[in-house]
Amino acid sequence: MFFSSALIILAGACYALLFAWSKVNSKRFIKLLAHLSYFVLVIAVVELTQAANFSGYWLLVSIIMVIGYFFAPISIWHLCVKTHDDHTITTRGGD
Amino acid sequence: MNETPRWASESFWKKTAIWVTAGSFLILIVLTFDTLSKTSAGSTRVPDYTVINQKIDYRFDEKLNKFMPIIGGEELLFDKKYTAEEAEQLVTLGKKTTQAKNCMNCHTLLGNGAYYAPDLTKAWLDQGWISRDMREDMMLKFLMDPENNARTFGSGRKMPNLNITEAEARGVIAFLKWMSSIDTNGFPHNFTSIESEEE
Amino acid sequence: MSSNESSAVLTNPSALWHKACTAVNRFKAWVALDGGNLSPGQTLAVKYFCVAVVLFFAQLLFGLLAALQFIFPGFLYEFLDFSVNRMVHINAMVVWMLYGFIGCIYWLLEDESGTEIVGLKWGNLAFLILTAAVALVVLVYILVQIGSGTDSSLWFINEGREYIEAPRWADIGIVAVMLVFAYNVVATFNKGKWSGIAGVLTLDLVALAGLYVAGMFYMTNITHEQYWWWWVIHLWVEATWEVLVGVIMAWSLMKLLGVRRKIVQTWLYIEVALMFGSGILGLGHHYFWIGTPEYWLTIGGFFSALEPIPLVAMVVHAVYDAGAHAFKNSNHPALAWIIAHAFGNFFGAGVWGFMHTLPQINLYTHGTQWSASHGHLAFFGAYATINIAFFYLAIQHWRGGVWMAGDSQNAWRWKWALGLLNAGVLGMTIALLIAGYEQSFIERAVEGSTWGGYFSAQNHPSFQNAMVWRLIWGLVTFAGLGLLIWDLLTIGKGETRKAQVIEPH
């Protein structure tokens, strides 16, 4: 139970890391590994859901984790790109 | 290159940060008022201090699927029936003693504290006090002279002598009895109380 | 008394004083630091850093004593009991981290505001008062230890509430000193210029001082007492401290790596939104079992699931930055500690936190060595590392901005200090994790948290072995700190190469 929840975070981080890496370095297998770690995350969530006997509201938390951790890195990546975007058009500035 | 979209701009996130913080804090304030009123002494979750005049047990509730405190009939502490005022005074003395003696840096109370000595949440109901009749006397002796009444359970860890007076010890026992009646959402789980032994 | 004797008494203290002065002067000559390299604000900052390092040392020393008592329960019994050692251990930690943060803020204040510190005299006075008060509190902890069950004990000896044991008089003093500090910050920005970083910093400091007040009241109702107690502990450690680190990091990123202000500030706001959005109501995960209503199980569980999001954001952003820019950096030890911070924060707060934060799991892990395991890695990873990184930045500047790199003379010292400290804390964390796992299994699940159950878990060989390993890794950590202090005193001493000036890009 403890380890499935630890695995969720670890797999979530691996997925985020590999996803971001696949954007920087567009190799096929990195993207594949990213999806693989997401797959591990889903299994860990399912494992935790069963081990902790989630029902009702708590199933919702599981679903949010599965969906949320999939989209979070993608949206954060977009945010990274967009917030750093203007740096190419503005001249050297800032402090 | 295109402009920075609104959702990635500094001003958008500044506003978001302010709104998210203010919103969360507001919700916390509302919940705090609700929680404080639902847990004042005398509420269903946290009984009045006069509960020390009553029998307390802690059992598994099949319907709620968790352990719950059970407040029974009269069971006096030190053969005395305390009025509301006396009970609060006694528990207050006990609570102040637990703080002044720094209990929390060895024990846990409601599961919070240090992990060098056992949890005190349900200490009043612990089977370590052997039987209901011996309990008060044993607790009193232990608190006032822990070195010679040591309860180490083979660990070698002894509570040090903390110069607890008899009045303070009675206060601590009253505080522990009152604390054991708090509805802690089923923590600790699987507990076998001193009462279940006696049946 | 003969005149001979009295003169001996009179001369002796002065001789002693003289000896102490020579020793201090010799030490200064050996360290050979030039105070002329520092601005007035930075001079105040390094005072805070010095006390922070002394308290860091005290934290580890008393931690070792407490660790020894798990193995030899008779060790220092009724002289320095576990409760005393453990209290000094955690209090020294809280206070040295606060000293570190205050030092960091004074360090960046002049640069960020573009002017000199307005109430520098007050700042220096506050430093002296705070340090004297801390010394007095610790002396009372160690020499007086406990009092009778009266209000005066809580006012003058010990409040007996984990992490905020400081007696009430010291509480009031701490708030007063924090207000002087906040005044300095606000007045300085007001005189110079405000910025996004300045705004976030000011609001965070107000919250920091305000929250402390929530922990300054006596309550007989223990449910209410622990409710407010967690306001201070959680909202400090998991909200305002995190944002404080965010502010320090934001400034460092501009100065160290030359990231542009607009980007840094946008991300500071994003971080505040994520941290406070998940952290403020994340408070719920402390309200599972203290008598508070059941809805806290739902709130605590949900927001705990959100708390890793800011960490995921950091991971993605770090990769983005690494891929998008090739950063130049001229302080390798500081950068190494910032990397340690990223990993430590992620594992300590993220993985170790989430492992036992859902109520279904926490029912079995609450009040066991799990919390100690999480506490060690999270405090070290999130806060100790960032402070140490800043110590290196400060010493580099103090040495006159010399080059500090992996190939410098005696670079093995900072590398080994880094390795030993990280390995030591990780080792302790894993030992405590094993102990906690055994406890939740034997004490909680099998024996149901009775005193008998507690002790059968404590006496179990796997628990005992874990405690031995914890002590061993504690000694490794201690060795690491010794090396770190030596390195901080000597690094860059013989170095003449100047560090590169980092330009914003």
Image (cartoon, helix red, strand yellow):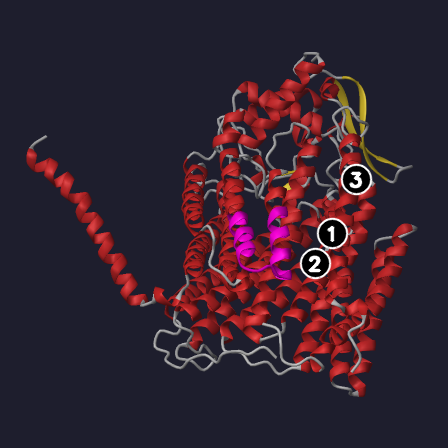
Marks 1 and 3, Cα distance to the nearest angstrom? 15 Å
Residue nearest the observer in this picture, B178 or C390: C390
**CB atoms of marks 3 and 2 within 8 Å:** no
Q: Secondary structure at mark 2?
A: helix
Tell me residue B130's x, y (percent): 67, 28
Foreground of the two, C20 or C128: C128
Chain letter belonging to callout 1: B
Is B116 covered by the magenta stretch? Answer: no
Magenta stretch, overall SS: helix
Residue situated furthest left in the rendering:
C3
Circle nearer the N terminus (1, 3): 1
Q: Position of residue B34 (x, y in %)?
A: 80, 35
Task: Identify the disc placed on residue A76.
Answer: none
Residue C199: in magenta span: yes
Q: Which mark is residue B31?
A: 3
Residue linked to disc 1: B21
Q: Which mark is residue C272?
A: 2
Q: Secondary structure at mark 1?
A: helix
